[in-house]
């Protein structure tokens, strides 16, 4: 197990360390110093900044640091009496291009080689997540991703192959889940409106946040599949006007769809129930104060 978030509360670092979590990520000097105080002697790995091109849900900019900074930070970790273990990166969630791992692995190899020249031998490479689920757009097989990663490691690390850590979260769980919603209302905004609005009891704030920007296009299932369809605007139930699921993409639903019908979102086992809970990622909800 590792503490993979690069933005941790110091008290939680100490608690994890006390419970035996001896491997933590960082991407800044302040986080590294925090680890040295709260988890003395821990193994640490630095997250690299990558662009996430080709991902349905990019994770660039917020996490990771530049390659030259990563080298300096790994060397500095030794002076803080931490144990530098390796590096990590994340090429973006729902990554549809297996070749995106290659430049990230090349960057990681340069960090390994630079550190080795100073006598610091790293041995752990966390290639992150990104392996896709099956939504509307076809994606390569998992074997294609494994082959691309293995080939890049062989080319950039040669005989000094590191130990691998892989995080195949979405790939493992998304296709195992269905989000079942119910149609609350089907309406037109005018006598001449070209598209109906279909409102359901799930939305941006309760289970479908990954439809923000219409990035993730779930396959939909209704009791009327196979009947004539037309393009609709699909929206959630809340009073927030941003709670619209699909309005720019070609979302087509049966003409016979009616109030009370179920509408299923397929491959919804990842990032739905956890977002809808009050403790997504384990963070407690905000407290409410009535004044």
Image: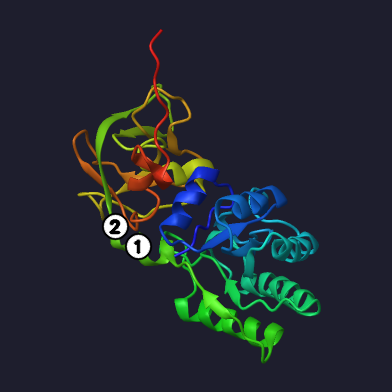
Quarter occupied by residue 201: top left
At mark 1, the secondary structure is helix
In-image side of 78 versus 193 (left or right):
right
At mark 2, the secondary structure is loop
Above-or-below relation of 207 to 216: above
Q: Position of residue 33 (x, y in %)?
A: 67, 51
Look at discs 2 and 1 and give the one toward the viewer: 1
Query: In the rendered image, which residue does mark 2 sit on?
Result: 177
Q: Quadrant of the N terminus?
A: bottom left
Above-or-below relation of 252 to 108: above
Label 2–label 1 contact, CB within 8 A: yes
Q: Find the residue positioned furthest to the bottom.
A: 159
Task: Identify the residue at horizontal 33%, vertical 40% (top origin).
Answer: 277
- Is residue 37 in sight in this rendering? yes
Q: Position of residue 275 (x, y in %)?
A: 39, 43
Query: In the rendered image, which residue does mark 1 sit on?
Result: 173
């Amino acid at each position: 197990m590792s503490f993979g978030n690069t933005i941790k509360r110091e008290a939680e670092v100490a608690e994890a360390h006390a419970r035996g979590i001896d491997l933590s990520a960082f991407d800044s000097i302040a986080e590294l110093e925090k680890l040295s105080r709260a988890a003395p002697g821990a193994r640490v790995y630095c997250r690299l900044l990558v662009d996430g091109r080709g991902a349905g849900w990019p994770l660039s900019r917020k996490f990771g640091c530049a390659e030259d900074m990563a080298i300096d930070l790994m060397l500095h970790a030794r002076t803080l009496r931490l144990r530098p273990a390796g590096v990590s990166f994340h090429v973006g969630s729902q990554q549809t291009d297996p070749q995106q791992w290659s430049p990230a692995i090349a960057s990681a190899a340069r960090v390994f080689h630079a550190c080795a020249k100073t006598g610091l031998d790293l041995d752990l490479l966390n290639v992150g997540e990104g392996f896709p689920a099956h939504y509307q757009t076809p994606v390569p097989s998992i074997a294609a991703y494994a082959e691309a990663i293995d080939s890049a490691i062989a080319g950039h690390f040669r005989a000094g192959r590191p130990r691998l850590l892989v995080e195949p979260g979405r790939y493992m769980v998304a296709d195992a889940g269905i989000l079942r919603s119910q149609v609350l209302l089907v309406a037109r905004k005018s006598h001449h409106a070209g598209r109906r609005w279909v409102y359901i009891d799930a939305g941006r704030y309760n289970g479908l946040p990954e439809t923000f920007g219409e990035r993730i296009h779930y396959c939909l299932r209704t009791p009327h599949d196979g009947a004539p369809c037309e393009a609709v605007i699909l929206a959630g139930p809340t009073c927030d006007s941003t709670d619209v699921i699909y309005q720019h993409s070609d979302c087509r639903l049966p003409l016979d769809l009616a109030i009370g019908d179920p509408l299923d979102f397929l491959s919804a086992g990842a990032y739905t129930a956890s977002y809808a809970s009050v403790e997504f990622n384990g963070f407690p909800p905000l407290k409410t104060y009535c004044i």
